[in-house]
Every structure is written in C-alpha cells, then in structure tokens.
Image (spheres, rainbow, N blue to C red):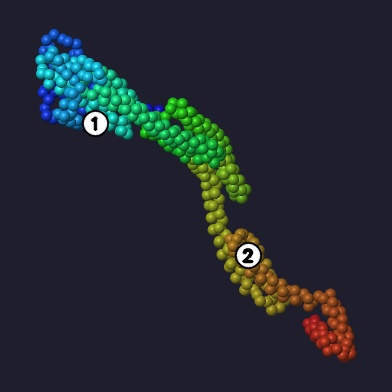
Amino acid sequence: MADENVTTPENTTEITEQATAPAPEETVVVEETTVVEETVAEAPTPAPTPAAMPKPHAPSPAAFAKKTPQQHAPKRSTVTYSQADVTAAEAFGRVDDNGTVFVREGDAEREVGQFPDASKEEALALYARRYLDLKAKLDLFANRLKSANVKNREIDDTLKTLTEETAEPAVVGDIAAIKAQFEELKAEAAAKKAAIAEARKAAMDKAVAERTAIVEKAEALAASLGDNTNWRSTADKFRNLFEQWQEHQRTTIRIDKADADALWKRFSQARTTFNQARRKWAQARDNERNHAREAKEAIIAEANEIKDSTAWGETSRKFNELMGRWKQAGRAGRNEDDALWARFREAADTFFNARQADRDQTNSAEKENLSRKEELLKQAEALVPVADEAAAKKARQALAAIQEEWDQIGYVPREAMHRIESRLDAVDRQIKAVEDAAWKQTDPEADARKSSFEVQLTAQLAELDEKIAAEIDPKKKAALEAEKATKEQWLNAIR
C-alpha cells in the first residue's frame, strides 16, 4: 500500500546576527529551517578574547544534512528591529562593570551571560536583540499555526524547542510577556492539532468511503457472475478497479491499517471469486471443445467414407444428416473449428461436385432427349384431326410407332415433361374420340339401349301432352312444357 507522505520539518528559527554596535535600525532575517543555536558562556571566564565573542555564522553541513526534506521551499520573513524596540527590551536588563549581563524577571534578577571587552551599551544591546529574536520566533510560530499545511509533528517539535528556549532564556527583555505569549501559543497549538485531527478524520472517512465504493463494485461484479457472463469484459472491469485501488493509495491519505486490511480482504475475495469462476468456466469450455473436436473428427471420418459414393440421393441425405450433427457438436475453438470445417467441406465438396457433374451430364442428355421428343411431337400432332374410322385407325398405327420411339428416348428436363406429355396425350385423345364414336355406331348393345330409351321418351312425351292439355294453372303448365322441351331434345339427340 502507498504510504502517506508526511513531511515533518523542524520549523524553528535561524538567526543571523552581527556583533556590532546597534544601528539606528537593523534587519534580522528569520528563516524557517533547522535551528542553529549559538553558545554563550554564562560562567565567568578569565580574560575572554575577541575570538570568544559572538560572531555571525551559517549552518554547518551537518546541520543541513539533518534537515527533513520539505515539500516546499523554505519560507523567509524579514523582521525589522527599530531602535525603539531595542531600547524597550534593554529596560529589563543591566550590565555590571565586569561585562556580566543581567535581566529583571518579576521581582528577581537573573544573570544571562557575559560580554567582556565591549562597552555596556554593546553588551546590553546584544542581549536585547536576542530577546527580539526569540520574540520573532514566537511570532513566526504564531503565523505558522495559521497555515493550512502545518503538521502535528511540526507543531510538537517547535513547541519542544520553544519550551526549552523560553524556560530561562539568555536574553534581555520582557520575559513575562514572552512566557505569556508562549502559553497562548500552546493553547493555539492544541486547538490547531485538534482541528488537524478532525480534518484528518474527515479525510480518513472520505478515503475509507471511496475505497469501500471500489470494493462494493468488485463485490457486485463477483455476485453477478453466471452463464451469460462476458468473462473478458468482466476481467477488464476488475483490472480497472484494481488500478483505481492503486491510484487511490497513491493519491489519498493513508487510512488505518485495520480498515485498509479489511477492505483489501473484501476486494481480494471478490477477485478470487471471479478468478475461480473464470477458471471453472475455462475448464468447462475446454471440456466442451474437446468433446466437440472428437465429435467433429468422427463426422469427418464418416464424410470421407461416403464422399466417393454415386448413390446421389441416399448420400445427399447422409451428408445433410452429418451437417445437422456438426451444428449440434458445438465449437472446438476458432482456429481448430476453421481447420476441422475445411476438412469436412473438402469431403462434402468431393461428393457434391461429383453429383453436380453427373447432373450437368444428365441435363445435357435430357435436353437432347427433349429436342428429339419435340420432333416426334410435331409428327404426332400432324396426324390429327381424323375424319372417319379408317383415318383414325391409320393415325393410331402411326401414333403407336411414335410412342414406342418416344419411350426409348428417355428422360427430358423435369420442367418440360408435363408440357410435351400433355401435347402427346391430346393427340391420343382426338384419335380415340373418333374411334369411340365409330364403335358406338356399330355396337348392338348400344343400339338396343338407344331403342329402349327412345320408346320411353316417346311415351313420356305423350303423357306430358295430356297433362299440359288438362292443366289450368299457368305456372304448372309452364313447368310441364319446359320438361317436355328437354325430353324432346334428348329424343332428337339419340335419333
């Protein structure tokens, strides 16, 4: 997990000063970096030399090496000490004839250091400026507490340093005011730390909520797995959620380990559920593909056995059956399916190409047969019409010879079969009609039936004449007359 980057610089003050006589107005640069303290001898020393006098100095390389890296460049502020400020601080101290400097703290007086080989004014001014420097540190800390990016550790470190520096400061000035200001700063620091803690808790709660949202999305994906799951798409979604998790770790506050571990456990469990389900699906898919491959290999073997058959109808039905089994066998994987299908199609094409070649040959022969039968049809249609029984008999003999040759020619294209057969049948019917008519005229039984029917019709007509003569009702009489007319037509037809 990504750690929260917390920079904890020690924000105290480094004071650059010059051991010179006070000028009417001087500037002291206060830099917010690591403290570089100077040591002032408080115990009396025999005949101090000018080398022992305080001198301006810069932080050593070791001091810089100990500095904690900061996210931002150090802030610099310029504190201006007026002569009035120095004079006001000097009012709280004195220097004796030996160069010993004292400060008044309440009703008591305390020795703060020595500055021999210098005038009393210079010594007092030096320690007064030190007081102003210490006050500048407190002011700087007060401003720092108002900053939005101040950290708890920075506050604690600064308070620790200032506690030591304000306990018995070797300065000349209003010590009580310094300590009172420091007490106020401690209260402000406590309030600031409480605000930081509250803000951190809010940020923590927000980070936990955001991390929880990622977990819940992963759990929802895991709960939605089923037969219709798009495993590739779902894997991409889990990958995106994991990237969001990592980005959240890098860019947000570090949440508590217990919460982080609990959320990661849930997220990991959701991913594990998905991975296990996908492996199970992949295994089932591999089994299905193996079965499909075996089934299709068997179908290909059967296709190769019958691909050279010339039993066109039966083999065509067999290939249709194999095609149905192929569709039901499932998929063996895209690449393998393409290779298997190519082998099956090779066997099927061998058979169907041979069948088509046979059909093409047959069609060519049938077309030739059609041409020959059309010539015979012209000869047959030239036999009709026939005028009498003798012509019908002669036409029948010629038609019989045509029909015999017709049968020997063989098949014609199916779409032309009905057309030419109908035309030949029409010739046969015309000849047969004349033959039937001649037979009826010479058939004794037909003549007897005709005579008997004629007698019956004659008797019925005589009876109808009597009924018509006796009928008075016009409608009934008209009906009898219509019946008589019909029977008279029958009588005329058989005579």
Q: Is residue 404 above or below residue 482?
A: above
Residue receiving disc 2: 418
Instruction: Identify the amino acid type marked 1.
Output: Lys
> From this viewpoint, is residue 286 visible?
no
Question: Residue 440 is drawn in which quadrant?
Answer: bottom right
Point 58% across, 43% down: residue: 328
Instruction: Identify the amino acid type marked 2.
Output: His
**CA separation, marks 2 and 1?**
110 Å
- Foreground: 107 or 241? 107
Residue 413 x/y as whole percent: 58, 61
Residue receiving disc 1: 75
Q: Residue furthest top?
A: 46
Point 25% across, 18% down: residue: 107
> From this viewpoint, is residue 421 visible?
yes
Neighbour class for label 2 at 10 Å: few (<14), some, many (≥20)?
Answer: few
Report the number of discs: 2
Point 55% across, 58% down: residue: 363
Q: Residue furthest front?
A: 107
Residue 248 x/y as whole percent: 40, 34
Residue 272 x/y as whole percent: 50, 30
Residue 352 x/y as whole percent: 54, 49
Q: Quadrant of the C terminus?
A: bottom right
The label shown at residue 411 is none
- Foreground: 54 or 380? 54
Q: Quadrant of the N terminus?
A: top left
